Image (cartoon, helix red, strand yellow):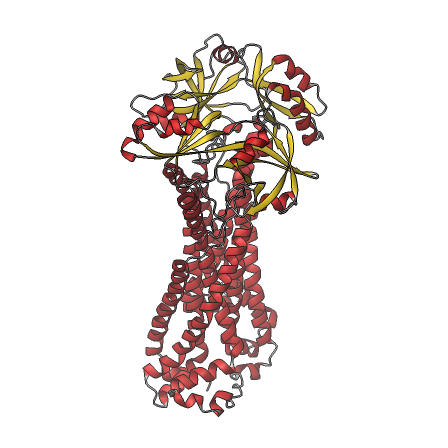
């Protein structure tokens, strides 16, 4: 049988159902944000580690031009090396009927005896493993096979070392080495344009004339081995064979992108839910404390009837616990569903067999614990203040505030306003703390609206500045090797090309003291119109004739500045180490790179002026024909369309950011409405007796509405500038948590975001005002005035 206090609990929940619902939604929004982002991060992280361990992901990756197989045994004897796996790895083309240009592919060898690779193992998703002795049987990367609708048993035509060959796809597979399968030199993945083909080693060696040799090597380290020392030793061994520099797993392309995505998600999963939970906890604290304060007479009556303080306190803790429980239940379920959807979004770009969302009970408990703690603290403070009073005193209304003439009234300023406006002004100035807390609560809801939408603003700024203003070419042609500059003129005279420019990219290692970074120096001619240099503010930067123009984040990481000389180790051609002065720095959003005049770069690498990238402006009507001719031309490695790159960037980054922004904005709207509505409802409850008295004295409904809603309007108006400022700071904090070596997003908040956030708050205020006005119109004057008799 229910006790009297429990029956009161249910009655209170029914009476306060509007406020209970909105507060529960605020709690739900905070917990759902935490469960969604933290759970998605945990699922990705755990899936990656489990996948790497199961398929024995290598620790170090190295490539060279052609290395005798005996060298692999030398490398295996190096200190710190546990096991070595030499391979053949070559780029190929995959022509498809009816398409203007072939897709790109990479042939990677697997043991000819049919055994699985000792590291970077393959997981067959469909079909079977190739049978030894069948040279034409291959495994195909599952991403490509799915995008191209290629099934086991189908035939795949490939141009292997210039020869057309039909390969029999017997199965599709995934590899930890290609979780993020990216065509070399491309910035964004194209599942239908880049394939990995696993072929028996003897077949691959025969096709690419690599018998008794390898050009790709992976290895694992012994426990406790120094990764840097092993990489240096491997580089020394492979240097005579055209080694391109060994890479640790952290720099391996697929793992690098996956890790960077995890770091970004971890930042978001830590920072954003903290904001939501903190805001929700703050609001919960304020609203519940005021709600319980309104029940002061009831608490006093319970004390007078003999209920002990502990029982009364537990009663109100039950009330807030029910609210938090309802919000937690909705928040966990919503977070679980959203986390599953977010994880599905990531599976489109990061292919792992075990990638699925898993709700971590610890994550859910943390979210519930934070919300419950805030609610209990808020309720406990309010209950404690009331139960400390003797029952007789608590049953009386609180003493009225000391009303004295303010300085504005003494100066006669308030005489310019009507009675209702003067009453609003007096209430605000004589209860400044209550007004300030209400304004801060509303401003925090507005701030998370601004911060939630700022991600898409920053992304659009990045696309506009980097891909639409700095890059203006229609097509970028990547050459297999550096070629004399006359190739620019040759490509410029192809049918459909209206303008051509060339540039040179040289992979280097910048070294300063004990710090080094692998990067690229771009050599630019005097007038490179299609790749201008802009800093993050959109200002064009002039390239110095001599010396390096280095990206400012790279300069900071290396600890160098303008006027310093830095060691540059060239990683191609005849190589060599040089000291180059730094002539300037540039703030850019992407990557770590430097720029030189192409003449200075040519002198640095000791060659005639060459290019390995040709930028083309083309006639769109002749693009297909031009692409076919370029693909058929020897020396062309790949073609990149700027519009295609923008579309893929929007599809990948924009899709995940857009979904995240939408969810955060939706939750922020819920919080904003919850805050404004509860502020209005609490204000009505606290002032109902005063307003009823005014009605009895002859004030109209419009006049008493103006008194109450005027206060709400002032709180909202005060909150808007504070919220916009707080939101901008939050956006800057979120952007600052991005990995600076990958990209450096500028905190951009558009005027549309400010306008949207302001409109939502004003809309929430208007809706709340209309609901409160309806309550005022039905105010029971006699009932309210008799309450304290």
Residue 785 visible, this angle: no
Please say if 278 is above or below 251.
Answer: below
Report which quarter residue 787 is drawn in.
bottom left
- Residue that protrudes farthest toward the top in the picture: 133
Q: Position of residue 38 (x, y in %)?
A: 53, 47
In the rendered image of this protein, does residue 70 appear above or below residue 768? above
Q: In the drawing, does residue 199 fall left or right of residue 694?
A: right
- Does residue 703 appear to the left or right of 589 in the view shown? left
Q: How many marks?
A: 0
Residue 348 position within the rendered picture, expressed as x and y whole percent measured from the top left: 43, 36
Picture quadrant where residue 169 is located: top left
Out of 607 and 86, give the one closest to the viewer: 607
Q: Residue at x 69, y 25 (%)?
A: 233
Image vertical order of residue 684 relative to residue 661, above or below: below
Provide residue 40's location: percent of width, then percent of height.
50, 43
Q: Nearer the viewer, residue 446 or 29?
A: 446
Q: Is residue 708 visible?
A: yes
Task: Spot the residue most to the left.
Answer: 621
């Amino acid at each position: 049988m229910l006790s009297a206090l429990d029956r009161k609990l249910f009655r209170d929940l029914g009476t306060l159902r509007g406020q209970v619902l909105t507060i529960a939604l605020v709690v739900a929004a905070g917990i759902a944000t935490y469960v969604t982002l933290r759970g998605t991060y945990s699922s990705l992280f755990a899936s990656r580690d489990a996948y790497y361990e199961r398929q024995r992901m290598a620790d170090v990756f190295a490539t060279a031009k052609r290395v005798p197989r005996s060298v692999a045994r030398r490398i295996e004897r190096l200190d710190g090396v546990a096991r070595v796996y030499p391979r053949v790895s070559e780029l190929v083309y995959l022509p498809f009927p009816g398409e203007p240009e072939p897709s790109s592919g990479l042939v990677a060898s697997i043991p000819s005896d049919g055994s699985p690779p000792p590291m970077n193992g393959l997981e067959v998703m469909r079909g079977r493993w190739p049978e030894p002795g069948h040279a034409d049987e291959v495994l195909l990367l599952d991403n490509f096979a799915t995008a191209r609708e290629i099934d086991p048993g189908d035939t795949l035509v490939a141009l292997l070392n210039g020869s057309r060959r039909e390969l029999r796809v017997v199965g599709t597979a995934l590899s930890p080495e290609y979780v993020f399968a990216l065509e070399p030199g491309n910035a964004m993945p194209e599942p239908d344009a880049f394939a990995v083909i696993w072929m028996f080693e003897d077949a691959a060696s025969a096709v690419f004339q690599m018998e008794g040799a390898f050009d790709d090597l992976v290895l694992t380290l012994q426990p406790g081995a120094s990764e840097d020392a092993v990489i240096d030793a491997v580089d020394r061994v492979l240097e005579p064979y055209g080694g391109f520099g060994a890479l640790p797993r952290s720099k391996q392309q697929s793992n690098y992108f996956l890790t960077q995505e995890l770091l970004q998600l971890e930042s978001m999963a830590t920072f954003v839910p903290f904001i939501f939970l903190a805001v929700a906890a703050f609001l919960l604290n304020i609203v519940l404390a005021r709600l319980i304060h309104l029940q002061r007479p009831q608490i006093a009556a319970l004390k007078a009837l003999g209920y002990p303080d502990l029982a009364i306190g537990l009663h109100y803790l039950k009330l807030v616990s029910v609210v938090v429980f309802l919000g937690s239940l909705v928040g966990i379920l919503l977070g679980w569903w959203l986390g599953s959807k977010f994880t599905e979004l990531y599976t489109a770009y990061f292919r792992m067999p075990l990638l699925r969302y898993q709700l971590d009970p610890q994550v859910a408990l943390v979210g519930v614990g934070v919300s419950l703690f805030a609610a209990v603290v808020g309720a406990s403070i309010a209950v404690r203040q009331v139960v400390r009073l003797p029952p007789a005193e608590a049953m009386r209304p609180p003493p009225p505030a000391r009303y004295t003439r303010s300085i504005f009234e003494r100066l006669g300023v308030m005489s310019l306003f009507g009675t209702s406006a003067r009453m609003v002004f007096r209430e605000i100035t004589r209860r400044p703390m209550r007004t300030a807390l209400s304004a801060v609560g509303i401003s925090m809801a507005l701030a998370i609206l601004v911060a939630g939408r700022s991600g898409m603003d920053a992304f659009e700024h990045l696309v506009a500045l980097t891909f639409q203003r700095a890059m203006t070419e229609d097509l970028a042609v990547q050459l297999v090797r550096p070629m004399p500059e006359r190739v620019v003129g040759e490509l410029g005279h192809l049918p459909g090309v209206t303008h051509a420019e060339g540039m040179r990219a040289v992979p280097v290692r910048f070294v300063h003291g004990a710090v080094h970074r692998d990067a690229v120096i771009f050599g630019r001619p005097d007038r490179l119109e299609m790749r201008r240099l802009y800093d993050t503010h959109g200002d064009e930067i002039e390239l110095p004739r001599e010396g390096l123009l280095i990206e400012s984040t790279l300069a900071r990481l290396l600890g160098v500045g303008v006027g310093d000389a830095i060691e540059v180790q060239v990683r191609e051609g005849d190589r060599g180490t040089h000291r180059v002065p730094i002539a300037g720095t540039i703030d850019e959003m992407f990557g770590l790179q430097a720029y030189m005049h192409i003449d200075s770069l040519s002198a640095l690498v000791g060659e005639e002026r060459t290019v390995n990238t040709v930028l083309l402006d083309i006639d769109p009507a002749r693009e297909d024909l031009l692409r076919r001719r370029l693909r058929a031309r020897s020396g062309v490695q790949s073609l990149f369309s700027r519009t295609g790159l923008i579309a893929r960037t929007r599809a990948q980054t924009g899709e995940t950011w857009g979904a995240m922004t939408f969810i955060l904005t939706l939750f922020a709207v819920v919080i904003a409405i919850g805050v404004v509505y509860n502020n209005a409802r609490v204000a009505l409850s606290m002032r109902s007796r005063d307003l009823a008295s005014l009605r009895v004295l002859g004030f109209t409904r419009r006049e008493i509405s103006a008194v109450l809603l005027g206060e709400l309007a002032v709180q909202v108006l005060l909150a808007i500038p504070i919220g916009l400022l707080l939101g901008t700071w939050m956006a800057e904090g979120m952007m600052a948590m991005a990995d600076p070596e990958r990209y450096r997003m500028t905190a951009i908040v558009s005027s549309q975001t400010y306008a949207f956030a302001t409109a939502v708050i004003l809309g929430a205020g208007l809706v709340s005002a209309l609901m409160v006005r309806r309550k005022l119109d039905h105010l029971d004057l006699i009932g309210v005035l008799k309450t304290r008799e």
